[in-house]
Amino acid sequence: MGSWSDIVADVEDIVNDVRQTFTGTEQNADSVSEFPWVFAVVAGIAVIAIIIILIRGIKAKKAQNIKKKKTLYEQGYLQYRSAKEPVCATYLNCDKGYLEGRRYAITNRLTIGHNPERCNVLYPVRVGGIASEHCEVRLRTDGQVEIVDLGSMGGTFLENGRQLMPNVPTIIKNGGRFYLATTGEMFRIDNKIQ
């Protein structure tokens, strides 16, 4: 059972089968009075079939939602946390540049760039040096923060000017800063254990 249109088609088929069964009996009223239990049985079977089809459709919809949720966890957009783990409020602060003054909570990962479908921290295209998917800031399970350049042309740099290698995670300490393409787009990590 894939979609509601399949369920509706199945129900219509059952209704048509029941109509065909009753068509011959309308012409012969005497035979109808002799076998009234046949109509009750056919109607009961039709109702049961409709209920089964609806239940299958609901189960299929729930299975799709569960699969979608697991996919989000596998992709890292959602994160399971144990009740015993300390709650960590980790933020990405923009200290300088187009997004200056903005603060983003890092619950698992943040992607910085122009692409509105794939980035959580979004730059307009008019800001030069920023790639469509420039870099990613990730919160590791041990509470440390790492940054990964995603192969951007402008590059991602630590505060001391060291350029990050593409696709190589680099741990950045609490209070550490990094910038995108130029020192004019500066970010800072703010990590507070509660």
Image (cartoon, rainbow, N blue to C red):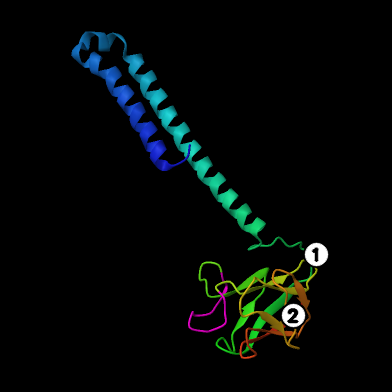
The quadrant in which residue 193 appears is bottom right
Report which residue position mark 1 lands on.
84
| In front of the other: 63 or 95 | 95
Q: Percent from the top left, x then y, of residue 57?
A: 47, 39
Question: Which residue does the image show at 51% across and 45% down from the upper left?
Answer: 61
| In front of the other: 101 or 25 | 101
| Label 2 element class | strand
Q: Is residue 124 magenta?
A: yes
Report which residue position mark 2 lands on.
191
Between tags 2 and 1, which lies in front? Answer: 2
Q: Is residue 84 magenta?
A: no
The stretch of residues the image draws in magenta is: 119-131
Q: Percent from the top left, x then y, of residue 71?
A: 61, 54
Can you tell which mark lies on residue 162? Answer: none
Give, as a three-letter code, the residue at label 2.
Asn
Q: Percent from the top left, x then y, of residue 6?
A: 41, 37
Question: As drawn, is 88 to the left or to the right of 64?
Answer: right
Count all numbered tags in the image, as a single digit: 2
Question: As drawn, is 130 to the left or to the right of 172?
Answer: left
Kindly report the secondary structure that dominates the magenta region of the rendered protein: loop
Give, as a three-letter code, the residue at label 1.
Lys
Q: Is residue 33 above or below residue 81?
A: above
| Label 1 element class | loop
Question: Which residue does the image show at 73% across and 74% down from the upper left?
Answer: 165
Q: Is residue 16 above or below residue 73?
A: above
Q: Percent from the top left, x then y, of residue 118?
A: 55, 67
